Image (spheres, rainbow, N blue to C red):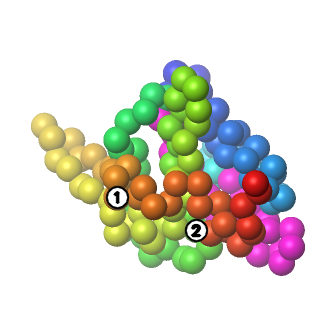
Amino acid sequence: MTKGQLTGLAGTHLVAAQLALRGFNPVVTSRNMKGTDILVENVDDGRTSSIQVKTNRRTFSFWLVGESSKRNVQPRNRFYVLVNIRTTEVEYYVVPARVVRAKTIREVRRRSTWYSVDRAKVAEYKDRWSLLGRPEVR
Protein backbone atom coordinates (compact mmCIF):
# COMPACT_ATOMS: atom_id res chain seq x y z
CA MET A 1 0.00 0.00 0.00
CA THR A 2 1.07 3.55 -0.64
CA LYS A 3 1.32 6.22 2.03
CA GLY A 4 -1.83 7.85 0.61
CA GLN A 5 -3.77 4.58 0.76
CA LEU A 6 -2.70 4.08 4.37
CA THR A 7 -3.84 7.61 5.21
CA GLY A 8 -7.23 6.85 3.65
CA LEU A 9 -7.48 3.59 5.56
CA ALA A 10 -6.61 5.35 8.83
CA GLY A 11 -9.29 7.97 8.18
CA THR A 12 -11.91 5.32 7.47
CA HIS A 13 -11.17 3.50 10.72
CA LEU A 14 -11.11 6.75 12.72
CA VAL A 15 -14.58 7.59 11.38
CA ALA A 16 -15.85 4.07 12.11
CA ALA A 17 -14.59 4.41 15.71
CA GLN A 18 -16.35 7.77 16.12
CA LEU A 19 -19.58 6.26 14.80
CA ALA A 20 -19.38 3.32 17.21
CA LEU A 21 -18.71 5.66 20.15
CA ARG A 22 -21.88 7.55 19.20
CA GLY A 23 -24.03 4.42 19.23
CA PHE A 24 -24.08 3.57 15.53
CA ASN A 25 -23.29 0.21 13.99
CA PRO A 26 -20.59 0.93 11.36
CA VAL A 27 -19.42 -1.62 8.80
CA VAL A 28 -16.22 -0.81 6.89
CA THR A 29 -16.65 -2.02 3.31
CA SER A 30 -14.06 -3.69 1.13
CA ARG A 31 -11.91 -1.39 -0.97
CA ASN A 32 -13.67 -2.38 -4.18
CA MET A 33 -17.10 -1.04 -3.16
CA LYS A 34 -17.23 2.11 -5.27
CA GLY A 35 -18.23 5.28 -3.45
CA THR A 36 -18.91 3.73 -0.05
CA ASP A 37 -16.30 3.29 2.65
CA ILE A 38 -18.68 2.71 5.57
CA LEU A 39 -22.25 1.49 5.81
CA VAL A 40 -23.76 2.70 9.04
CA GLU A 41 -26.95 1.69 10.84
CA ASN A 42 -28.70 3.88 13.37
CA VAL A 43 -29.51 1.25 16.01
CA ASP A 44 -32.43 3.29 17.40
CA ASP A 45 -34.48 3.47 14.21
CA GLY A 46 -32.77 1.01 11.83
CA ARG A 47 -32.05 3.75 9.27
CA THR A 48 -28.93 3.08 7.22
CA SER A 49 -26.58 5.54 5.57
CA SER A 50 -23.66 5.32 3.20
CA ILE A 51 -20.47 7.22 3.99
CA GLN A 52 -17.50 8.05 1.83
CA VAL A 53 -14.42 9.18 3.77
CA LYS A 54 -11.84 11.62 2.39
CA THR A 55 -8.74 12.06 4.54
CA ASN A 56 -5.79 14.47 4.65
CA ARG A 57 -2.77 13.50 6.73
CA ARG A 58 -1.92 17.14 7.27
CA THR A 59 -4.41 19.96 7.53
CA PHE A 60 -5.27 21.30 4.13
CA SER A 61 -7.88 23.82 3.08
CA PHE A 62 -9.50 21.29 0.73
CA TRP A 63 -10.16 17.59 0.07
CA LEU A 64 -9.85 15.93 -3.32
CA VAL A 65 -12.99 14.10 -4.40
CA GLY A 66 -13.81 12.06 -7.48
CA GLU A 67 -15.67 13.30 -10.52
CA SER A 68 -18.68 11.24 -9.42
CA SER A 69 -19.19 13.63 -6.48
CA LYS A 70 -20.17 16.28 -9.02
CA ARG A 71 -22.35 14.36 -11.44
CA ASN A 72 -24.23 11.70 -9.49
CA VAL A 73 -27.66 12.23 -8.03
CA GLN A 74 -27.13 11.86 -4.30
CA PRO A 75 -29.80 10.24 -2.08
CA ARG A 76 -30.57 11.74 1.33
CA ASN A 77 -28.87 8.88 3.17
CA ARG A 78 -25.46 9.45 1.55
CA PHE A 79 -22.76 11.42 3.36
CA TYR A 80 -19.12 12.34 3.14
CA VAL A 81 -16.96 12.56 6.23
CA LEU A 82 -14.02 14.81 5.45
CA VAL A 83 -11.10 14.23 7.82
CA ASN A 84 -7.97 16.23 8.65
CA ILE A 85 -5.50 14.26 10.78
CA ARG A 86 -3.51 16.87 12.70
CA THR A 87 -0.63 16.31 15.09
CA THR A 88 -2.73 17.03 18.18
CA GLU A 89 -6.31 16.41 16.99
CA VAL A 90 -8.49 15.02 14.26
CA GLU A 91 -11.08 17.21 12.49
CA TYR A 92 -14.29 15.67 11.14
CA TYR A 93 -16.75 17.32 8.77
CA VAL A 94 -19.97 15.30 8.33
CA VAL A 95 -21.43 16.63 5.08
CA PRO A 96 -24.48 15.44 3.14
CA ALA A 97 -23.46 14.26 -0.33
CA ARG A 98 -25.86 16.72 -1.97
CA VAL A 99 -23.94 19.57 -0.27
CA VAL A 100 -20.61 18.17 -1.46
CA ARG A 101 -22.06 17.96 -4.95
CA ALA A 102 -23.12 21.62 -4.84
CA LYS A 103 -19.80 22.80 -3.41
CA THR A 104 -17.39 20.69 -5.49
CA ILE A 105 -15.01 22.74 -7.58
CA ARG A 106 -13.79 21.48 -10.95
CA GLU A 107 -10.32 22.67 -11.86
CA VAL A 108 -8.30 21.94 -14.98
CA ARG A 109 -4.52 22.15 -14.81
CA ARG A 110 -2.09 20.98 -17.45
CA ARG A 111 -4.44 18.54 -19.13
CA SER A 112 -5.56 17.16 -15.75
CA THR A 113 -8.94 17.67 -14.13
CA TRP A 114 -9.22 17.86 -10.34
CA TYR A 115 -12.32 17.99 -8.18
CA SER A 116 -12.13 19.35 -4.65
CA VAL A 117 -14.20 20.61 -1.74
CA ASP A 118 -12.97 23.70 0.08
CA ARG A 119 -12.95 23.52 3.89
CA ALA A 120 -14.36 27.04 4.26
CA LYS A 121 -17.43 26.02 2.23
CA VAL A 122 -18.25 23.13 4.59
CA ALA A 123 -17.10 24.66 7.90
CA GLU A 124 -20.65 24.59 9.30
CA TYR A 125 -20.57 20.76 9.09
CA LYS A 126 -17.67 20.30 11.51
CA ASP A 127 -18.58 17.52 13.99
CA ARG A 128 -22.20 17.37 12.72
CA TRP A 129 -22.62 13.69 13.60
CA SER A 130 -26.25 14.44 14.50
CA LEU A 131 -27.07 14.64 10.78
CA LEU A 132 -26.97 10.85 10.84
CA GLY A 133 -29.98 10.82 13.17
CA ARG A 134 -28.56 10.56 16.67
CA PRO A 135 -27.70 13.24 19.21
CA GLU A 136 -24.02 13.89 19.63
CA VAL A 137 -22.26 12.25 22.57
CA ARG A 138 -20.99 14.79 25.08
On-image quarter of the N terminus: top right
Q: Nearer the viewer, residue 69 or 129?
A: 129
The region drawn magenta spans 38-56
Please say whether residue 46 is one of the residues in the magenta stretch. yes
In the image, 14: left or right of 70? right
Q: Amino acid at mark 1?
A: Lys
Q: Which corner quadrant of the image does residue 131 belong to?
A: bottom right
**Residue 23 to residue 54: above or below:** below
Query: Mark 2 — residue?
Result: 78
State the SS at label 1: helix
Of pointers 1 and 2, the one earlier in the residue sequence = 2
Residue of label 1? 121
Amino acid under label 2? Arg
How many C-alpha atoms fall within 10 Å of the one at disc 1: few (<14), some, or many (≥20)? Answer: some
SS at badge 2: strand
Residue beneath the point at 21% across and 41% down: 112
Query: Do callouts 1 and 2 mark residues in contact (Cβ within 8 Å)?
Result: no
Q: CA distance from mark 1 to mark 2?
A: 18 Å
| Residue 19 located within the stretch drawn in magenta | no
Provide the major secondary structure of the magenta segment. strand
* Residue 26 shows up from this direction: no
**Residue 36, position in %: x, y?**
61, 56
Taking the spot 76% from the left edge, 54% from the top edge, the residue there is: 138
Residue appearing at x 43%, y 33% in the figure: 59
Please indicate, yes or no, whether residue 44 appears anywhere in the rendered image: yes
Give the image location of residue 73, x and y in percent.
45, 75
Residue 82 in percent (x, y) is at 51, 49
- Mark identifier at residue 63: none
Viewer-nearest of discs 1 and 2: 1
Question: Residue 10 location, x and y as percent?
Answer: 64, 32
Within 10 Å of disc 2 (Cα), the crowding (few <14, some 14-19, many 20+) is some
**104 left or right of 95 in image:** left
